[in-house]
Image (cartoon, rainbow, N blue to C red):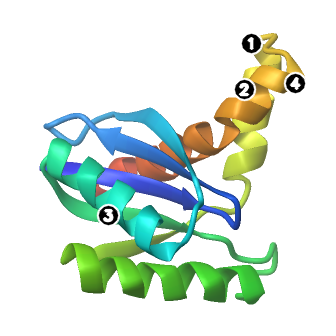
Amino acid sequence: MRILGLDIGDRTIGVAVSDPLGFTAQGITTIRRKGEKRDIKELKDICEKYNIELIVSGLPKNMNGTLGSQSEKVMKFCEVIKEYIKLPVEMWDERLTTAAANRAMIEGDLSRAKRKKIVDKMAATYILQGYLDSISK
């Protein structure tokens, strides 16, 4: 079963996909947000291309575990995904995933410009890998 991981932001959506056995996550793209309809179409195309059966979206909680305005935006967009793509969507706590992705890229000596281009895709990979690790136990 292939699973799609998403890091949903206001300007971009980082996208990762699991291998067919559900062990590892690989970042595949960053979608530049162009409006809800176009965003959903791009996600639907990816889901069809990879035969996705489940979507895992990062849920941006505050450090104290509460939900803020960004969490509400993400949950609302996930409801639209469920309605139009017709796949189950699970939420995954994404606290510190972007920070971890940035730290890994800094350690890999990537320039700021290169990091900016792939940070969302990397964060989606961290979100999905965290989910995959949790279900494999």
> Disc 1 vs disc 2: Cβ atoms closer than 8 Å?
yes
Mark 4 vs mark 1, CA separation in Å: 11 Å
Tell me the residue that label 4 is attached to.
112
Q: Is residue 35 above or below residue 18?
A: below
Tell me the residue that label 3 is attached to.
55
Q: Residue 122 sits in which quadrant?
A: top right
Mark 1 is surrounded, within 10 Å at the Cα level, by few (under 14), some (14 to 19) or many (20 or more) other residues, namely: few
Which kind of residue does numbered mark 4 sit on?
Arg
Residue 130 position, x and y percent, is 47, 50
Which kind of residue does numbered mark 1 sit on?
Gly
The residue at the point 23 percent across, 34 percent down is: 19
Mark 2 vs mark 4, CA separation in Å: 12 Å
Discs 3/4, front? 4
Q: Residue 12 sits in which quadrant?
A: bottom right
> Which disc, if any, is residue 104?
2
Tell me the residue that label 1 is attached to.
108
> Does dot 1 land on a helix, a strand or a loop?
loop
> Disc 2 vs disc 4: Cβ atoms closer than 8 Å?
no
Mark 3 vs mark 4, CA separation in Å: 29 Å
3 or 4: tag closer to the N-terminus: 3
Q: Is residue 136 left or right of residue 126?
A: left
Discs 2/3, front? 3
Query: Is residue 136 in view from this perspective?
Result: no
